[in-house]
Amino acid sequence: MGMYHYIRKLWKRPKDNLGDIWRERLVKWRREPATVRIARPTRIDRARELGYRAKPGFIVVRQRIKRGGKQRPNDRRGRRPKHNRLKLVLAKSYQQVAEERANRMYPNLEVLNSYYVAEDGNYYWYEVILVDRDHPAVINDKRISWIFKAQHTRRAFRGLTSAGKKSRGLRNKGKGAEKARPSNRAKGRKIK
């Protein structure tokens, strides 16, 4: 069996298998800013599965997300609505929020995919793979050159990444998923 098999096995239970390294990483990451560009992926097996290549045009960003309920922004003016809710119902996963925040920090890059790296009582950490669409190494690589086309812009914000499609219910087919396609908004706008 290859190296990636054993790396994947370690990451099944990282807290037990990585021991002190896991704790040291969390202590260090808590002190860092929310969005940090890193030289290479922490989970090389997962990154390569999702399309990462160690070549120019690809970068990896570690994104920290606060855990807990998603609070509404506090509006200080005007009367509250009669059906006011304290929590914001987002219908997005933490992973999708992480992708969007990373993309806002690097607006000239496109989100390819992302994966989980760690969590503690306060935060989740995800690593987001970003691609420079205009880099010659990306344009000339037949495995990734599809991202150069116009329909693949702003993927993270349009729910076109893997995490986005999962939140939109596009992993399910058949019975029970009739109203998931083409999108949640479009299903109610169909011409009868």
Image (cartoon, rainbow, N blue to C red):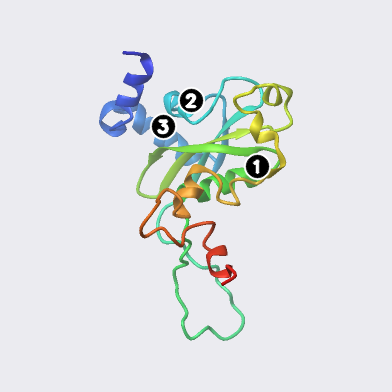
Residue 57 spot, x, y in % from top left: 66, 26
Q: Which tag, 2 or 3, sits closer to the chain's start?
A: 3
**Mark closer to the chain start, 1 or 3:** 3
The residue where tag 1 is placed is 152
Using the image, determine if residue 26 lies above or below residue 52: below
Between disc 1 and disc 3, the foreground one is 1
Task: Kindly identify which residue carries mark 3.
Answer: 25
Q: CA distance from mark 2 to mark 1?
A: 20 Å
Q: Position of residue 172 (x, y in %)?
A: 40, 51
Tell me the crowding category of disc 2: few under 14, some 14 to 19, or many 20 or more residues within 10 angstroms, Cα based.
some
Above/below status of 155 relative to 42: below
Q: Earlier in the sequence, mark 2 or mark 1?
A: 2
Query: Residue placed farthest to the left in the image?
Result: 16
Pinpoint residue 68: horizontal percent, then vertical percent. 40, 57
Q: Which mark is residue 91?
A: none
* Cα–Cα span, label 1 and label 3: 34 Å
Mark 1 Cα-neighbour bin, 10 Å: few <14, some 14–19, many ≥20: some
100 vs 170, left or right, is right
Question: Is 26 situated above or below 144?
Answer: below
Above-or-below relation of 135 to 36: above
Tell me the kind of residue under disc 1. Answer: His
Between tags 2 and 1, which lies in front? 1
> Hey, which quadrant is residue 153 in on the image?
top right
Mark 2 element type: helix
Q: Amino acid at mark 2?
A: Arg
Q: Between marks 2 and 3, how big is the CA–CA gap? A: 22 Å
- Which residue is painted at 43% across and 60% down in the image? 178
Helix, strand or loop under label 3: helix
Return the residue at label 2. Answer: 48
Quadrant for residue 55, please give it.
top right
